[in-house]
Amino acid sequence: MIALNIICLRLVRWTGWLLLPVVLAFLATGYAMSGRYGLGVLASERAALTLHKLMHAPLAVLVVAHVVPSLYLAMFRWGWIKHRSGA
């Protein structure tokens, strides 16, 4: 496995684990804002909205950092991207 593939694989794994709590918190604050499923007790509507808005940038960065290497590895696996031989 070439070095770029190893780096991409590690990046996909790390960002996947980092995305898990961020997405769960994003959903929790969204439902806390609307008061659905009893999650309104977690925070006031204003606090939930503030936290929800603060999570947009980290969520977008993590999604891009997760999807781009995943797509590269998938295309490499499918044969759309070939390993270059030589220098």
Image (tube, helix red, strand yellow):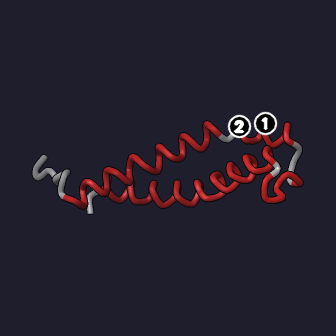
Residue located farthest toward the left when viewing the structure as drawn = 86
- Give the residue type at disc 2: Leu
- The spot of residue 42 in percent (x, y) is 86, 53
Tag 1: residue type? Answer: Thr
Q: Position of residue 25 (x, y in %)?
A: 71, 52
Looking at the figure, which quarter contains the N terminus? Answer: bottom left
Q: Is residue 73 left or right of residue 63?
A: left
Q: Residue at x 78, y 38 (%)?
A: 49
Q: Is residue 58 above or below residue 5?
A: above
Disc marking residue 54: 2
Q: Secondary structure at mark 2?
A: helix
Q: x, y percentage for residue 87?
A: 13, 46
Q: Image point 85% across, 41% down: which residue? A: 45
User: Would residue 19 be found to the left or right of residue 27 on screen?
Assistant: left
Judging depth in this view, the residue of 49 and 34 nearest the camera is 34
Residue found at x 85% / y 37%? 46
Distance, label 1 to label 2, CA atoms, is: 6 Å
Q: Nearer the viewer, residue 47 or 2?
A: 47
**What secondary structure is marked by label 1?**
helix
Residue 11: x, y in percent? Answer: 45, 54
Residue at label 1? 50
